[in-house]
Amino acid sequence: MMYTITLQDPPSDTPERARSDAEHRFQRTLERALGGPENVIAAYRAWQTAEETSEAEMSDEDMAMAKKWFAAASRARNDGLRDLGETEAWFEVRLAK
């Protein structure tokens, strides 16, 4: 795995299986939307750059990838959390070093 997904701040009574299933759904949705693990990493890096850089300083390709990340991550969050009900939980993405 070139990156990890971790569900953060789920409800305290969330079973480990539900947490694992949510992380898997989030990852699967990201990879389908972006075209595989390598593209997930590229889009995530572009999004990180966009968060720290002005749009004028970014290439058109990186800006497009950042926008793809934003859309895919939003969809993946909805898919990942669908069985957990109302929650403030979120997914952390960590790239392998």
Image (tube, rainbow, N blue to C red):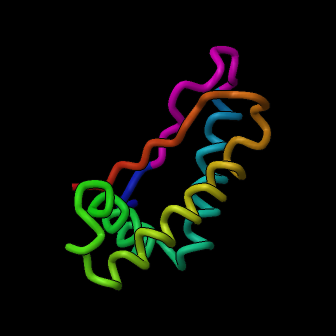
Who's the residue at 27% across and 82% down the image? 59
Location of residue 22 (image quadrant): top right
Location of residue 42 (image quadrant): bottom left
Q: Residue furthest top?
A: 12
Q: Residue furthest front?
A: 56
What percent of the width, then of the height, locates residue 94? 35, 49
- The magenta segment: 5-15
Who's the residue at 68% across and 28% down the image? 87
10 up-or-down from 55: above or below: above
Q: Main secondary structure of the magenta part?
A: loop
Of the 4 image quadrants, the one containing the C terminus is bottom left
Who's the residue at 77% across and 43% down the image? 82
What percent of the width, then of the height, locates residue 92? 44, 42
Who's the residue at 62% across and 73% down the image? 32
In the image, is 9 to the left or to the right of 22? Answer: left
55 up-or-down from 18: above or below: below
- 36 part of magenta stretch: no
Of the 4 image quadrants, the one containing the N terminus is bottom left
In the image, is 12 to the left or to the right of 52? Answer: right
75 up-or-down from 10: above or below: below
